[in-house]
């Protein structure tokens, strides 16, 4: 996962950005792809009111990440009553299911 606490792209300065990304694209052969379904959550550490995002994406060496530039607004994330940031820590979890793998014909 890639978490940008001050945002990325269109979320820069206004939102926390959160992406699921390939860990090591060098292990992919040229033209290979992985199709995954995923859910990413920022956990509310106080009241268990989590914020979730779901997606499906073809990951490849040339397209390594999928997620949200505007995952959650910074003011809401920083609000003590939201429970997302407690003692300078936030908890993020991901569920990933690989639905398919495509390799080029040789």
Image (cartoon, rainbow, N blue to C red):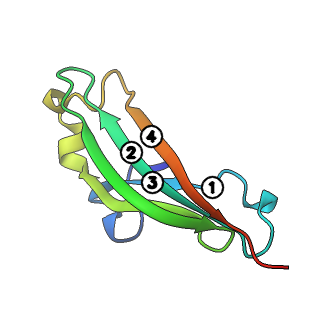
Front of the two marks 4 and 3: 3
Label 3 Cα crowd, 10 Å radius (few <14 / some 14-19 / many 20+): some
Quick one: which residue is furthest to the bottom in this view? 106
The residue positioned farthest toward the front in the image shown: 105
Tags 4 and 1 in contact by the CB under 8 Å rule?
Answer: no
Disc 2: which residue = 40
Residue assigned mark 1:
22
Give how far apart the Cα atoms at labels 1 and 3 are: 13 Å
Q: Nearer the viewer, residue 6 or 56?
A: 56
- Label 4 vs label 3: CA separation? 10 Å
Q: Where on the picture, by quarter, is residue 11?
A: bottom left
- Name the mark on residue 94: 4
Helix, strand or loop at disc 1? loop
Question: Which of the two discs, 1 and 2, labels the residue nearer the N terminus?
Answer: 1
Cβ–Cβ under 8 Å for marks 2 and 4: yes
Q: In this view, does 34 lie above or below 88?
A: below
Q: Residues within 10 Å of mark 2 (few under 14, many from 20)?
A: many
Distance of label 3 from label 2 (alpha carbons): 10 Å
Regarding residue 13, the answer to whether it shows in the image is yes
Q: Is residue 59 or residue 87 the one in the foreground?
A: 59
Q: For the point 50% across and 47% down, which residue is it?
A: 97
The earlier-in-sequence mark between 2 and 4 is 2
């Amino acid at each position: 996962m890639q978490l940008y606490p001050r945002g990325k792209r269109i979320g820069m300065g206004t939102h926390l950005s959160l992406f699921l990304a390939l860990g090591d694209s060098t292990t992919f052969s040229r033209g290979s792809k992985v199709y995954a379904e995923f859910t990413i959550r920022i956990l509310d550490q106080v009241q268990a009111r989590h914020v979730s995002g779901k997606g499906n994406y073809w990951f490849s060496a040339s397209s390594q990440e999928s997620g949200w530039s505007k995952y959650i607004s910074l003011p809401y994330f920083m609000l003590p009553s939201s429970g997302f940031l407690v003692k300078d820590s936030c908890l993020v979890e991901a569920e990933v299911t690989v639905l398919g793998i495509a390799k080029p014909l040789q």
